């Protein structure tokens, strides 16, 4: 919940800065998962295409969509496919905004996929990437007192996620160079989950009044402030198409 709320705030900030108020944007969500951001943007009036390879995820989004008003359902198109195959599904320059959140960690070589995302992005369009921060992999085991795990994390970009899968993280410096090379140079970046990365998945919001608002305010501030954002669990990078 913290991740989705922070990313939503940051994404809205970038969309507002780049596009006229009231413009209906063409949005592609690559690996939309449960569709949290896609549905939120559709409710905001935008035309959203979700690309997802997992049938279970697609079924979950379709079930959620079934409970939405007809006008919102009409603004969402779901496509079965892999993020590395955008060229098969979409024409160049088809979208004003492309989201790729929590996907690159499952791709061994992300450069080709990123180039494909850049291809379908219209000039002046926004590319939003959410990735695991390779420069902060030692933080989670270190804060948990796992000193062996922390020491091992300094020498790798691989890690085991909370699903038990062995995946990879990205370095901001490397992605910055890649985005420049594909014509979508980095415009701004944020940290996501600076203070709450070690919270259990099943944790509930603090019960005292206003506590969740204060938590989100602290996370939001840290995600925009050096040096805190550099050690966030996740990085939200926003590039703009030349």
Image (tube, helix red, strand yellow):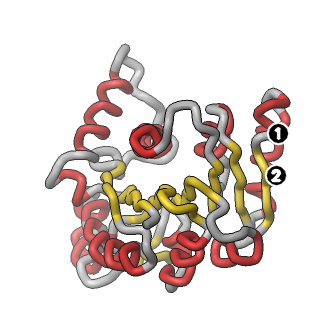
Q: Position of residue 6 (x, y in %)?
A: 41, 41
Q: Position of residue 75 (x, y in %)?
A: 76, 41
Q: What residue sits right under mark 2 in the picture?
A: 59
Q: In this view, does 60 lie above or below 230?
A: above
Q: From this viewpoint, which residue is outermost toward the left?
A: 227
Is residue 50 in view from this perspective? yes
The image quadrant that residue 142 belongs to is bottom left
**At x 81% / y 27%, what residue is drawn?**
69
The image quadrant that residue 64 belongs to is top right
Q: Toward the viewer: 106 or 179?
A: 179
Q: Toward the viewer: 241 or 222?
A: 241
Residue 65, numbered circle: none
Q: What element carries label 1?
A: helix
Nearest to the eye among marks 1 and 2: give it.
Answer: 1
Q: How far apart are marks 1 and 2 (CA)?
A: 17 Å
Mark closest to the chain's N terminus, 1 or 2: 2
Q: Do the residues labelled 1 and 2 touch (CB within 8 Å)?
A: no
**At x 59% / y 37%, what residue is drawn?**
23
Q: Position of residue 102 (x, y in %)?
A: 52, 61
**At x 25% / y 62%, what residue is drawn?**
139
Q: Where is residue 22 in the image (x, y as percent from the top left)?
A: 57, 31
Is residue 1 in view from this perspective? no
Q: From this viewpoint, which residue is outermost toward the top?
A: 209
Q: Is residue 127 above or below residue 205?
A: below
Tell me the quarter of the image containing the C terminus.
bottom left
Q: Residues within 10 Å of mark 1 (few under 14, many from 20)?
A: few
* Callout count: 2
**At x 57% / y 64%, what residue is drawn?**
121
Q: In this view, does 15 lie to the left or right of 35?
A: left
Q: What residue sits right under mark 1 in the picture?
A: 74
Q: In this view, does 109 lie above or below 132?
A: below
Q: Is mark 2 on a helix, strand or loop?
A: helix
């Amino acid at each position: 919940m913290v991740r989705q709320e922070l990313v939503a705030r940051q994404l809205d900030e970038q969309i507002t800065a780049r596009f006229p108020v009231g413009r209906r944007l063409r949005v592609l969500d690559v690996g939309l998962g449960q569709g949290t951001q896609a549905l939120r943007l559709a409710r905001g009036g935008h035309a959203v295409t979700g690309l997802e390879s997992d049938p279970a995820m697609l079924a979950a989004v379709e079930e959620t969509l079934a409970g939405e008003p007809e006008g919102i359902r009409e603004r969402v198109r779901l496509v079965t496919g892999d993020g590395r195959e955008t060229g098969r599904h979409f024409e160049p320059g088809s979208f004003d905004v492309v989201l790729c959140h929590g996907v690159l960690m499952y791709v061994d070589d992300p450069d080709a996929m990123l180039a494909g995302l850049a291809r379908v992005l219209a000039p002046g369009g926004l590319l939003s990437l959410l990735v695991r921060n390779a420069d902060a992999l030692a933080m989670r085991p270190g804060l948990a007192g796992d000193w062996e795990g922390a020491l091992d994390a300094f020498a790798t970009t691989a890690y085991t996620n909370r699903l038990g899968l062995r995946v990879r993280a990205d370095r901001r410096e490397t992605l910055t160079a890649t985005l420049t090379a594909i014509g979508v140079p980095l415009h701004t970046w944020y940290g996501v989950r600076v203070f709450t990365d070690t919270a259990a998945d099943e944790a509930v919001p603090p019960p005292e009044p206003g506590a969740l608002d204060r938590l989100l305010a602290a996370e939001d501030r840290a995600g925009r402030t050096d040096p805190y954002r550099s050690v966030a669990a996740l990085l939200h990078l926003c590039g703009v198409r030349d």
